[in-house]
Image: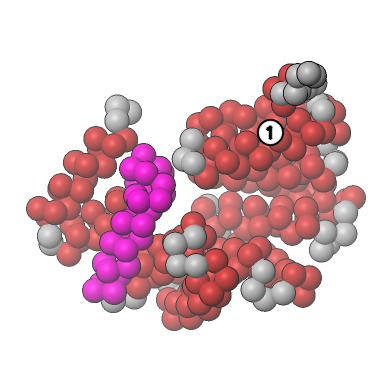
Amino acid sequence: MKEEQRVDEKAPGDSDALTSMHERVLSMKNEGDLGGAFELARKGLDASTSELGSEHPDTVTWMCTVAEMLVIEGDLGAAHTLADQALTTCLSSLEPRHPATLATMETLALTLSAQKDFAGARAISDQVIEARRALLGPEHADTLTSMQHLAETLRKQGELEKARSLIDQILEARERWSGSEHPSTLATKYSKALTLQAAGDGSAAEALLREVLEARERLFGNRHPDMHATLAALAQFLRDKGETSEAKELEARLTRLRGPS
């Protein structure tokens, strides 16, 4: 019987191997292995650039993935540089509404928002949302993700009513299409909780944070970064509220879960 060929045994630049590698990066990211995902994404970008060339859409996708990981790592300057490079490549070789172009624009918008260039991030997000609504429909998962990124930028800008209205639209659609405990739905609930907190609706924000924390811990485990982020947000909320005893308990728990620095 012929032995099945493993992905790891394929040539580094094999297109199937690169596709499998990118799927592994996304899986590792979703599972919370950010360090492993980042390392593998860098290798994937190098291999794609070598095999397919720097202007190939798949290489652009790798550039976006690495840029988004850089944002998570806090290396915003490098993320901006890479996102700019990717977008320049797209605009020179692809249509303005090509999926790779729109994905690259979104990556740049995320980077700008992290750099507190909210006006720049919002302008790009508006373009991406308009294009995705026209091409994919108003409730496609990619459209909803773009809308959520805009809502988060609006929250950071202090435009809380607009942010809350947009988040409510996204949440209604995601609960209807994906269910109340899909990871994307939980991400939207988390974003809504932060928006409610910023708007001064502490009771609703706390209830939603506790709901998301319970669901994320049950679904992802207690070592997932999203669970940690929710735990940290709830602890800070309680500390700001003056409930220092529970806040300290949650902070101590988070320290134990994260382990040694």
Q: Tell me if 102 is positioned left or right of 114 in this view.
A: right
- Rendering coords of residue 48 (x, y %): 78, 32
Q: Which quadrant holds the C terminus?
A: top left
Q: For numbered disc 1, what is the local secondary structure?
A: helix
Q: Which residue is mark 1?
A: 21
In this rendering, the answer to whether 229 lies above or below 52 is below
Q: Tell me if 98 is positioned left or right of 163 in this view.
A: right
Quarter location, residue 76? top right
- Rendering coords of residue 156 (x, y %): 45, 65
Which residue is at the front of the view, 57 or 216?
Answer: 216
State the residue at coordinates (58%, 51%).
111
- Rendering coords of residue 220 (x, y %): 41, 47
State the residue at coordinates (37%, 44%).
221
Q: Say what amino acid the circle numbered 1 marks.
A: Met
User: Is residue 74 something that shows in the picture?
Assistant: no
- Rendering coords of residue 22 (x, y %): 68, 38
Q: Is the stretch drawn in magenta largely helix, strand or loop? A: helix
- Residue extent of the magenta highlight: 202-230
